[in-house]
Image (spheres, grey):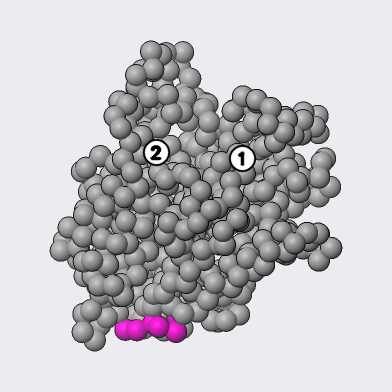
Amino acid sequence: MTHAADPALRVGVAQVEITPPVGFPMAGYYHERLAQGTANPLWAKAIVFQDGPVQGAWVVCDLTGVSIDLATTVRRRAAERTGIPFENIVVSATHSHTAPDYYRALYRHLGPAEEIKTDTDRERAAYTGRLVDAIAQSIADAQKGAIAAKLRSGSATQETPVSFSRRFVMRDGSQQTWVGLKHPEAVRCANPIDPEIGLLQIRRAEDDAPTGLVSNFALHLDTVGGHMWHADYPYAIEQAVRKELGEKAVSLFGTGCCGDINHADPTGAARRTAEAIGSALGTTICGGLAGLKEVEKPRLTVASRRVDLPLEPVTPAEVLQSLELVKAAQAGQTVPFLEHVLAYKRLMLDQLLRKEPTVDGTGLVSLGLSRTWRGVGESLPIDVTVFGVGDDVAIVFLPGEVFVELGLAIKQASPYRTTMVVELSQCVETIYIPTRAGSVGGGYEVTNSLVKRGSGEMLVEAAVGLLRESRAGALKP
C-alpha cells in the first residue's frame, strides 16, 4: 500500500477515441459479426490522481472486456510514458456488446510475425496496436492535464426501474437465466439488484468549474445489438452529464457488479432501449449532484492484493469433445446453447491450464488466447486494487463479471462513506464470478465461469481487507 502526506491533490481526466474500422469483428456473442458502421464513437476515458509523489491511474474503455494481455501491455506502456507505477494503473471495460472482439488480433499482434498470415490478420493486428497506444495515451493525457482539484462524492438512488435480476429460482430448486417470472416453473427472482449510483465529481480548485464525473452502477451492457459500433447506455449518460456540466466535462462510467443483472423486466414488460436507460440514469445522476459532499483532506491511498483464483479442471478427453462441438457450431450446425458455452469454456481452460494445450485453439476461440497467461497453471493470479481518497470515497476494482451480491457485500463492509465497486478490471478471463449459492443453483453464468466455487468470496475478503487498510492509512497523520 502506498499513500502520501501532502494534502494538495491534483486530478486529470482525458479521453481518446478507440473506435475500430468498419469490418472489424464485434464482440459479445458466440458467432462472428462484422461491424458495418458507427452509431457513436468508442472511447478510452482516463482519470489520474496525484498526491505528492503518489499517483494512481484508472482508464475505462468501451470494450466488452479487458484481457490480461491488453491490461498488461497498456499498463507497461502507460508506466513508461508517465512514471506511474505499473501496480497503480487499472484498466477496465464497460462491457458494451457492440465493441470490438480484439482478443485474437491482439494475441497475433503480440506474437511472432509469422503468425500474421493474411492481409486481414495484418489489418486487425494493426488496429490492436493502435488500441493499446490510444488507451495508454489517455492516461498520459490525463496526467498531463492534472490540476489542483476539489472532489465531491456521494450517491443517488435509481428509482425508475432499469435493472432487474436475470436469474430465477425454479420449482426443482435449480436456477435458470432469462426465463422470466411468467415461466410456469419460475418461483422468484434469484438475486437482488443494486439501485445505488456511486458518484465522484471533479472540479477545478481555481474556479470550481467541473472537469469530470465518475459514476458507477450495476447493470449489464447488452441493450443495443446489431452491427454498428455503440457505447451502449453510458453514451446517453455522457450526453446528460455534458448537458449539465458542460461539453468539456469527461463522463467516466464504471460498471458495477452485475453478472446476474440485466435490463429485461422479469414480468415481461417491454425492454427499455439504451437511450432510455442511459437517459433515466443520467437524470438521476444529474439530480444527485446537489447532494454530494466535499471530500475532506483528499489524501490518496493506492492498495493492491494478489488473489489466486482456482480454475476449474478439464480433461483432455473433455477438450477433444468440446473441439468437435465448437467446430460443428462454427460450421452452422445446431448445437444447444449451454453445450456450446461449456465447450468454448473448456477450450479456453485448455489454453490456460497447459503450457502445451491439448488442441490448437487459435482458430477456435478468441477470448482465452493469451501470451501472458498461456499455461499459467491451476489458478489465475488476480490483482484486486483499491483507490482511497481521504476517508470519504473509495473505488474497488475487481476482475470478471461479478454477481451483484458480492458487490453489495463489499459496500456493506466498507468503512468509506462512498464505495464504488467496478468489475471487469485488469482481466476478463474469469468470465463470470458467481456467489457460492449461485454456483449451486447453476444456470448460464455458472456454466460460463472459469473459476471454482468460492472465488467470488475470495475477492470480497481481499477487497474488504484492502478497504480497511486503505482507510487506516488515510487516517494516519
112, 453: nearer the viewer: 112
Instruction: Give the residue displayed 45% in from the left and 41% down from the top.
Output: 259
Type of residue at label 1?
A: His
Between discs 1 and 2, the one toward the N terminus: 1
- For residue 19, above or below residue 27: below
Q: Which residue is mark 1?
A: 31
Instruction: Give the residue displayed 46% in from the left and 28% down from the top.
Output: 177
Q: Secondary structure at mark 1?
A: loop
Q: Which residue is mark 2?
A: 261
Q: Secondary structure at mark 2?
A: strand
User: In the rendered view, does 398 fall on the left or right side of 110?
Assistant: left
How crowded pointer 2 is (Cα within 10 Å; few <14, some 14-19, many 20+) is rated as: many
Residue 317, by quadrant, is: top right
Q: Can I make out residue 353 in this image?
A: no
- For residue 464, above or below residue 239: above
Instruction: Give the residue displayed 58% in from the left and 31% down from the top.
Output: 447
- For residue 11, above or below residue 363: below
Type of residue at label 2?
A: Ile
The x, y position of residue 224, in whole percent, is 42, 45
Part of the protein shown in magenta: 143-148
Q: Label 1 vs label 2: CA separation?
A: 23 Å
The x, y position of residue 420, in whole percent, is 36, 56
As drawn, the residue found furthest toward the bottom would be 206
Q: Can I make out residue 229 in this image?
A: yes
